[in-house]
Amino acid sequence: MSTAHLTASNPAAESSTRGQLNGILFVALFAAAVTRIAAIPAIAGLGLSPLIVGIVAGALYGNGLRDGMPASWSAGVNFSARKLLRIAVAFFGLRVSLQEIAQVGLPGLAESVLIVVSTLVIGTWAGMKIMKLDRDTALLTAAGSAICGAAAVLAFESTLQSRPHKSAMAVGSVVLFGTLSMFLYPVLFKAGWLHLDTVGAGLFFGGTIHEVAQVVGAASNVSPEAEHIATIVKMTRVMMLVPVLLVVGVWVNRSARPAASHEGAVSHAPRKLAIPWFALGFLAFVVINSLHVLPETATSTLNMLDTFALTMAMTALGIETRISQIRQAGPRALTTGFILYVWLIAGGLGITWAVQHLFG
């Protein structure tokens, strides 16, 4: 019996498929509107990417007009927030090349590794032990601060399979402190309070500011050289997404075993390893971009489509988020973000000075 005949003879399945497609189309149209809003000079000038605008607009819709969307569309929204997200994160690798990373050499690599590892450890520990957050919220908040802002939160959310409101809290931290950095860092540098030269400023800005757009916005106020170095260091941090996700996948898998045993779940079947395979896709696209296999126009087009796909994922995530859930842990998550922000400034300066002294 053919698939078409099965579908035709099952109106419920056909209706479900139509609802999912309608949900995806709805999110796509919503994301298109968000992209236009993010391009408004006043918003673009704040360094707010379409991803950030998307989750805010989605959350406003999800909480204010949640009854305006048919229930059958929720499957399409969920697809955009989960499966489309994995594909988009993989294609994010086309923004990074090994040649660019090599340009900043060992100082840039050391800066990135030390910042990412220390921020993840401090954020997870402070979130769980001091602020009493659950593991997923603490990790998401730490990842957003340590690696690449909202994109890292999305990648970790997919790996941890956590609830949407936890990602929304982490993204809120990225928006607040990343935007603050974009305005504060240039002021501190020009006032002479950072005691850094142009190269040091590039390392510090790229190593400690949350979003790529925020790094560019802040470093462009120093000099073109600082902007170039900061952008490459930032993309080196983005590269760290792959090994970190693999380690987290293994950790999540191991920590789940004692929990299952504690609940009395006895199973001799091997547990599926929570390794994010889309991270390997990310790495593959980094290699493709480094080999210059694709024409520049094709890479540019794919990056534009990828940004739109990520915007769809963030918008869908916002639609699924409920403000009432955020209120329960909001202040604690925000305080964790603040602790990390203090570390990124103080600890980041210390790491930058040490790296320059060691490799200078």
Image: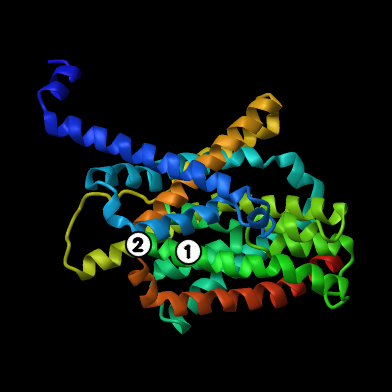
Total number of numbered discs in the rendering: 2
Residue type at the position of mark 2: Asn
Q: Position of residue 222 (x, y in %)?
A: 85, 61
Q: In which quarter of the image is the N terminus?
A: top left
Q: Which mark is residue 336?
A: none
Query: Residue drawn 55% across and 49% down?
Result: 242
Residue under label 1:
140
Horizontally, residue 104 falls left or right of residue 91, namely right
Query: Residue drawn 27% across and 67% down?
Result: 259
Query: Residue drawn 35% across and 57% down?
Result: 62
Bin the neighbour count of mark 2 within 10 Å (Cα to Cα): few under 14, some 14-19, many 20 and up: some
Q: Foreground: 3 or 19?
A: 19
Q: Where is residue 308 in the image (x, y as percent from the top left)?
A: 53, 41
Q: Distance between the residues labelled 2 and 1?
A: 22 Å
Q: Foreground: 287 or 213?
A: 213
Q: Where is residue 278 in the image (x, y as percent from the top left)?
A: 47, 42
Q: Quadrant of the C terminus?
A: bottom right
Residue type at the position of mark 1: Leu
* Residue 177 vertical placement versus 240 (above, below): below
**Residue 205 occupies quadrant:** bottom right
Name the residue at the top extreme.
Answer: 1
